[in-house]
Image: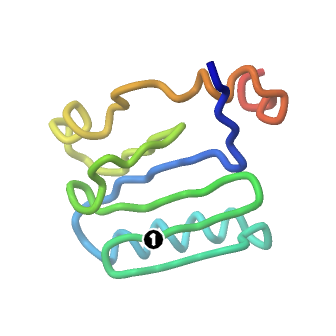
Amino acid sequence: MSRLSYDQIQVVVFVERDEKEVAKYFRLFRFMLGDQVTKSILSKDYAILETEKIRIRFYMGGLNMRGARAHYVINMMQNEEFNNICALPITSTHHYIKDDPKWRELFE
């Protein structure tokens, strides 16, 4: 059985269906990450922030998210039905990184 290796932790952030919401959370996370950001993309319906250790993708709830896989899902939408149907992980990818010494600090 082969072991997968992750160079970055994958995070998906769902926001309301409004391009202003995507931009708002993109700016917030960019501010929090500061000088660590190595790549940033801001589109009208999605955004991406990358650092050496983490890749954060921002999606408008329900759009362009089909098949999005992540170690962590952050749901900023105030919609319980969306949370129950779409934002919950189908399978946990944590077990791939849990035993990897590179990511030990996440699980201590």
Seen in the picture, residue 9 relative to 56 is either above or below; the reply is above
Most extreme residue toward the front is 1
Q: Is residue 6 above or below residue 46?
A: above
Residue furthest right in the image: 101
**Residue 17 screen position, x and y as percent:** 22, 65
The secondary element bearing badge 1 is classed as: strand
For badge 1, the amino acid type reads: Ala
Dot 1, crowdedness within 10 Å: few (<14), some or many (≥20)?
many
* Rendered view: 98 above or below 44: above
Left or right of 47 in this view: 88 = left
How are the colours assigned in the image?
A: rainbow
Q: Position of residue 87 (x, y in %)?
A: 31, 39
Q: Residue at x 45, y 50 (%)?
A: 12
Q: Position of residue 50 (x, y in %)?
A: 64, 64
Which residue is tagged 1? 47
Q: Compare residues 51 and 29 and report the one nearer the observer.
A: 51
Q: Residue at x 54, y 74 (%)?
A: 27
